[in-house]
Image (cartoon, rainbow, N blue to C red):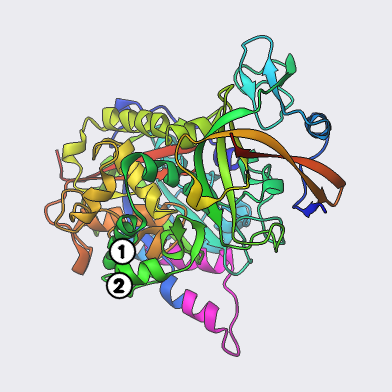
Amino acid sequence: MADIYKIDMPPAARELSRKASIVGIGESDYADDYKAQRAKLPGFESPTVESLTMRAFERALADSGLRREDIDGLACSFTYGGPPPEEMAQMLGLCPRYCETNGNIMAGPLPVVCGAIAEGKADCVAMIYGVASRSIGRVFGGTGPGSLHGGPSSYYYFHPWGWSSQAAHWAMICSLYMAKYGVREEDLGAVAQQVRRHASRNPNAVMQKPFTIEEYMASRYIVRPLHLLDICLVNDGAVCLIVRRADMARDMAHMPVDVAGWGEGIVTHNKFDFMVRQQLRPQIAQAGRQAFAMAGLSQAEIGHFEGYDASSFHLINQIEGLGFVPQGEGVAFCQAGGMELDGRLPTNTEGGNLSASYMHGWSQVAETVRQLRGEAGERQVAGLSYAMTCLAQTDQAHPLIFARGDAP
Amino acid sequence: MSEKRADRTLGPGHDTFWEYCAKGELRIQKCTDCGGMTWPVAQTCEHCGSEALNWERMSGKGTVLSWCQFHQDYYRGAPPVPYDCILVDLAERVPFISNPKGFGYDDIALGMAVKLAFLDCEDSAGPFKLPVFERA
């Protein structure tokens, strides 16, 4: 996806920290939509990007307590296509002065909007994201209908050797990691298990039923060493974030959540060397350093983390790469409860991409907002001031740091 | 008997790679400006952007850097699942996705020495020689 996520982010500059706040969040009904999509009862109509997005927007608007007229910006991020922003604005009943297409996955869109707000292009931007991945028959890997065309060469070049799919990328990184650090499949199972345990406390998670390590081991392989339960879901959905100028974001319906830091690390050459041999560590670490410096925070101050668990292993890769856990110790950290709600780093508390919803990093941001507001219900992490998300795919890392509006 | 495989990427540059394979040679593009290796085939050096690329013959020696086994039938039987892929660290320091020949997933250990071989294959463009690796 090297070519489609690449957008020009503003620099990770200290003076841009906490200049914009998330004041409203809305998500579609991941669990119900998934069930309906699977059941396809008579009269079922597949959701569209438009229908999903409009639902998420209405919810975010209601959540923010703002009126439509308060929104003077619209930023559209549709991974697999959607209407042009002007058309979308009309559908949503908005007349924004700032109206842009804005990347797609959560690898840059939020910093771009923070930058636009800082430049005075808008005071309050509705950021919308939507995908109908399941309804459009999106396929990951292979050469059949629905498979990805374009993107980085590692997505298609090795077809003659039978090698493609996101799962294969994670499997290749994971095998080397397991061999280097003596991690067994049944150890790795603890990661997917932990994320599912979190999802069991989230009524909007697509998969909510906890499983045992025996059930994990019995689940079929997708690309060995990774089992089905190590690989993320494919589902339809939408997320809307309403982002407002920080000084206008006080005294609102909810505690504002400030965007405090961001970073970026991209593999530009030697992909397999960086991705497998070095486990993307140079990119993840560089992006993390930028984000921490911009926010003026360190790992120890982050109380909640939401990583990009396209695979269970990749979540480990991020918590190690960002410096929360020493190299090679991430799986043991998870096994010892480090990612639990009362652990040292509660991680993917809504159930992540593995169990809750695959929204390309957007649902992780929504969860972070809920957690920092203190509105995560049964899965609330106690005493939070700062949280971090990270989107990392096979060749890039984009962390974000958030601060509760009343945190120093 | 040649094995049916999914289509190669063909076209300028790519064809050259497969023509060398047909002669039993594994050649990778090396930049005469910066010395960096570019794989997969590209029109410009992935390190410095130079167009001065030479086809450097690889020694065919390498070690296994990582591996995986496909159970998901992404290619509808070509090859039939389960099948293995390895990432070979060529002696010239190029990580190269390939298939093991004569050994499989449970035989593999990190750093295992391998050497180049070719497998007779066929895709919709016709027969070709696929570079694979056997135990050294």
Residue at image coords 44%, 46%: A175
From the viewer's side, name the closer residue of B69 and A370: B69
Residue at image coords 20%, 42%: A302
Asked whether the residues under the numbered discs 2 and 1 touch, taking CB atoms below 8 Å apart as contact, a structural biologist would say yes
Task: Residue A236: give x, y in percent of width and height.
Answer: 52, 66
Indicate which disc, 2 or 1, sits on the residue closer to the N terminus: 1
- Give above or below for A78 relative to B20: below
- Give above or below for A249 relative to A45: above
- Give above or below for B42 relative to A401: above
Task: Residue A118: give x, y in percent of width and height.
Answer: 38, 33
From the viewer's side, name the closer residue of A299 and A118: A299
Please count the marks in the image: 2
Question: Which portion, as a residue range, is magenta?
Answer: A34-60
Q: Chain of mark 1?
A: A
Question: Label 1 is placed on what type of residue?
Answer: Gln
Question: Label 2 is placed on what type of residue?
Answer: Pro
- Give above or below for A235 relative to A87: below
Bin the neighbour count of mark 1 within 10 Å (Cα to Cα): few under 14, some 14-19, many 20 and up.
many
Q: Is residue A74 visible?
A: no
Residue at image coords 57%, 67%: A134
Q: Chain of mark 2?
A: A
Image quarter hosting the N terminus of chain A: top right
Task: Identify the main secondary structure in magenta.
Answer: helix
From the viewer's side, name the closer residue of B82 and A210: B82
Residue annotated with mark 1: A193
Mark drawn on residue A210: 2
**What kind of element bears circle 2?**
loop
In the image: residue A73, left or right of residue A49? left
Task: Residue A18: give x, y in percent of width and height.
Answer: 28, 37
Bin the neighbour count of mark 2 within 10 Å (Cα to Cα): few under 14, some 14-19, many 20 and up.
some
A49 within the magenta span: yes
